[in-house]
Image (spheres, rainbow, N blue to C red):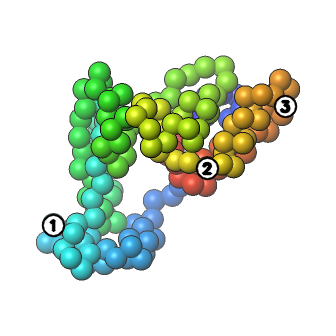
Amino acid sequence: YSHFGAYSKKDIVPRGFNPERAKEYFAKAGFRTLNTNGYLQNSNSKELVIKLSNPADFRKQDFMILIEQAKKAGLRIAYQTVDFSLAPGLVKSREYDAIVFAYPAGREPNFKTHFYSTHVDKNSDLTAANFSSSELDKLIDQFDASTHNQERIRLAHKIQKIIYDQAVYVP
């Protein structure tokens, strides 16, 4: 949400890359041993892998770098290209662990379309992150109902902080 002027919370910055810290979290989830391919696995030899779906190979070169970097933390990313016309169906099916997409630009952010709980676990091509929060819903309702610009900016910043803190969306 960096392209919405005053609505953008400027102090949100990408998280740093720390493979050792990632390995600590993966170990807490039971993935402690490196297999012969260099990826972490659990005690049942299940490999740590996420499926990353990318409609139309958007910025594929960037994701090839991400895949290489993830291996440093023991994470395998299974990259999958999806025809752009099939992307809404993929989002509805929830057949992915992570998906690449961009939010449409506009004068103001539209949080309800992408982060509102009513779309979660439904046959919907909205809320691709499948995240639900009553606190976030209340703030989104207040944002949509407000007619005061400064209040809307304040609410937009609070909404973005929750989205960032919960790692719902990676900028």
Q: Which residue is mark 1?
A: 37
Query: What secondary structure is found at the residue carrying circle 1?
Result: loop
Viewer can see residue 65: no
- Distance, label 1 to label 3, CA atoms, is 53 Å
Position above or below: 31 against 86: below
Q: Quadrant of the N terminus?
A: top right
Query: What secondary structure is found at the residue carrying circle 2?
Result: loop
| Residue type for callout 3 | Gln
Residue 49: which quarter of the image?
A: bottom left
Q: Earlier in the sequence, mark 2 or mark 3?
A: 2
Residue 25 appears at what percent x and percent y?
Answer: 43, 71
Report the mark closest to the observer, 2 or 3: 2
Q: Residues within 10 Å of mark 2 (few under 14, many from 20)?
A: few
**Does the CB distance between marks 1 and 3 fall below 8 Å?**
no
The residue drawn where x is 35% and y is 49% is 97
Given residues 75 and 19, the one toward you in this image is: 75
- Distance, label 2 to label 1, CA atoms, is 38 Å
Q: Which residue is mark 3?
A: 150
Q: Which residue is mark 2?
A: 133
Residue 160 appears at what percent x and percent y?
Answer: 65, 43
The residue drawn where x is 61% and y is 32% is 112
The residue drawn where x is 57% and y is 42% is 117
| Residue type for callout 2 | Ser
Q: Earlier in the sequence, mark 1 or mark 3?
A: 1
Residue 35: which quarter of the image?
A: bottom left
User: Would you say 47 lies left or right of 66 here?
Assistant: left
Q: Residues within 10 Å of mark 3 (few under 14, many from 20)?
A: few
Which residue sits furthest left?
36
Q: Residues within 10 Å of mark 1 (few under 14, many from 20)?
A: few
